Amino acid sequence: MASERQEYNEVSPWWGEHVHRYEEAIKVIGASRRVLDIACGNGYGSFILANASIEEVVGGDIDANTIEECNNKFWAKNLTFSVIDGTQLQFEDGYFDAVVSFETIEHTTNYMDMLKEFKRVIKDSGVVIISTPNIIINSPSGKVLNPYHTQEWKYTELKEILEREFSSVQIFGQKYSRYDNRRVNYKMGNVFEQIMYLVR
């Protein structure tokens, strides 16, 4: 699986989008649920989940160096970080109330194995919350542009894939609207961030 991590100390125009996903997940998960955050990256999202929960939160990533950084940066009494392969989860069936995995399945051709494992480790009443780019928005030519992505899907394609594993599927969109405000300073902020992004 290719790496495309949002680094914790990186200035990026996408931070609001990343944090928003976790905030929305918390609304669904609630405070008394055992949660797995798979492909947790630098761990900021797992930490957000742990601070909103009274139950166990596990942040997992396939990269050992990343997990070491997570352990050095974030601590909560109900939070642990471990090296975990999302296609081979080391948990018993029905262990979690929720699995969260943001911007992950587009990075591996083994995405069906991953989805099967997500289904296996959640309780019958559990929920899996994932995010992945819509190819029509992310790669409008139909050819995947991001070199870290092995595939992307249209809405209908993603729904069909998810319904192979899950009996109930809901798909929502996320629009990055930080600069919808038409005031000049917002427009200038957008231009500045785009320049910074291009010259990195």
Image: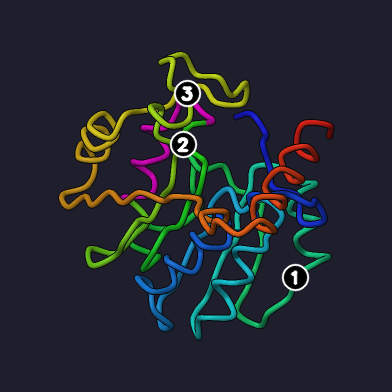
Q: Which of pointers 2 and 3 lies earlier in the amino acid sequence?
A: 2
Q: Which residue is mark 3?
A: 139
Q: Is residue 112 magenta?
A: yes
Point out residue 116 in the picture as x, y percentages from the top left corner: 33, 41
Point out residue 180 in the picture as x, y percentages from the top left corner: 51, 54
Q: Which residue is mark 2?
A: 105
Mark 3 burial class by Cα count in 10 Å: few <14, some 14-19, many 20+: some
- Span of residues in magenta: 107-119
Q: Which residue is mark 1?
A: 74
Q: Residue at x 20, y 40 (%)?
A: 163
**Mark 2 or 3: the one toward you:** 3
Q: Residue at x 38, y 72 (%)?
A: 29
Question: Along the horizontal axis of the image, is 51 left or right of 153?
Answer: right
Q: Which residue, as the protein is rendered here, is positioned at the far front? A: 184
CA distance for labels 2 and 3? 16 Å
CA distance for labels 1 and 3? 34 Å
